[in-house]
Amino acid sequence: MIYLEKITFPSGEQESSFFLGQKRTCYDSYYPFQILPKHNLRQIDFEPVTILYGGNGTGKSTVLNIISEKLGLPRDTVFNKSNFFPDYLALCAVHTNGTIPRNSRMITSDDVFDYMLNIRTLNEGLDNRREQIFEEYLEAKYSRFQMKSMADYEQLRKVNSARSRTQSRFVRENMMDNVREYSNGESAFLYFAEKIGENGLFLLDEPENSLSPEKQQELVQFLEDSVRFFGCQLVISTHSPFVLSMKSAKIYDLDEDPVDVKRWTELKNVRVYYEFFQKHEREF
């Protein structure tokens, strides 16, 4: 399914004309100006799976940020915008095939990291609460408490509960179990599975972060199934050979000047891996 058909960006000349018309003279940041013209990137035509490949600073994440802001897609973590971001968006144009589905979203590696961190923080809080309940149990079980008024009723209930239960049962009944804390790779994979639903446009910024090679292959299978069976369109920035190998993906090589569309086996990063393993073939 194709919801987003294409996006166009301003040329270097258009960017220069914009700045000539500005009265402002001091700038903290020009972002996202002066990034994409370095590679003569003027337009991207999208397929069900479109991948942006390139080294750091080539503009992969910038393109996703522009698309996300232009379409008003939700995201879990904010990113640094300059004062020029709205001006740049006004110079861009997106072409869609009707309305972008409401469950569409941007997913970044920062989103995944925060998700994993929140699980750990929650579990640390629960662990601290468990220790408090241990102390409450011992204090209630062996206290010489006597009820003197109705104000003491709740304490009486706690004392009776402690005296009639084992410590482990008392703790279980007074707090929830810890949220299961998976490995980083498992947590990251679960995040994608939760956020990517049916019939939506999803922008994924370096989804391979925090994933082992095995988990990356699982993610690729999940993403391919989401496109093939559940009406999703994906735009992905990545360095990962596993993600780059996705079936029928259209890959823009932002390392080229001008930007070129290539097969995944032609990309420099993939060739480095290929040549390395060829060199060490006899060791396997």
Image (cartoon, rainbow, N blue to C red):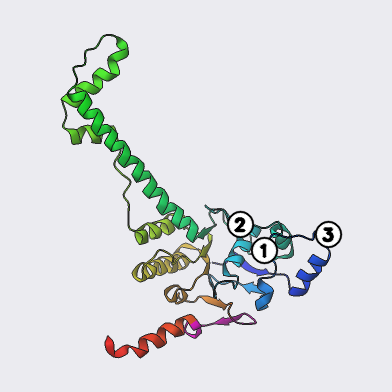
Q: Residue at x 80, y 59 (%)?
A: 24
User: Residue 202: x, y in percent?
Assistant: 53, 61
Q: Residue at x 68, y 61 (%)?
A: 29
Q: Which residue is mark 3?
A: 23
Image quarter of the C terminus: bottom left
Tell me: 22 left or right of 205.
Answer: right
- Give the Cα separation between the discs numbered 2 and 3: 23 Å
Q: Are marks 2 and 1 in contact (CB under 8 Å)?
A: yes
Q: Nearer the viewer, residue 13 or 198?
A: 13
Q: Is residue 143 visible?
A: yes
Task: Determine which quarter of the picture holds residue 258.
Answer: bottom right
Percent position of residue 139, x then y: 22, 25
Residues at marks 1 and 3, CA–CA distance in whole angstroms: 17 Å
- Residue 222 or 145: which is nearer the viewer? 145
Q: Amino acid at mark 3?
A: Lys
Q: Position of residue 3 (x, y in %)?
A: 59, 64
Residue linked to disc 1? 31
Residue 179 located left or right of residue 106: left
| 139, above or below 16, in the image | above
Say what secondary structure mark 2 lies in.
Answer: loop
Q: Residues within 10 Å of mark 3 (few under 14, many from 20)?
A: few
- Under mark 2, the amino acid is Asn
Q: Is residue 235 magenta?
A: no
Q: Secondary structure at mark 1?
A: loop
Please give the label number shown on residue 80.
2
Label 2 Cα crowd, 10 Å radius (few <14 / some 14-19 / many 20+): few
Which callout, 2 or 3, points at the residue further toward the start of the chain?
A: 3
Residues rendered magenta in the picture: 256-268
| Left or right: 283 as drawn, with respect to 168 | right
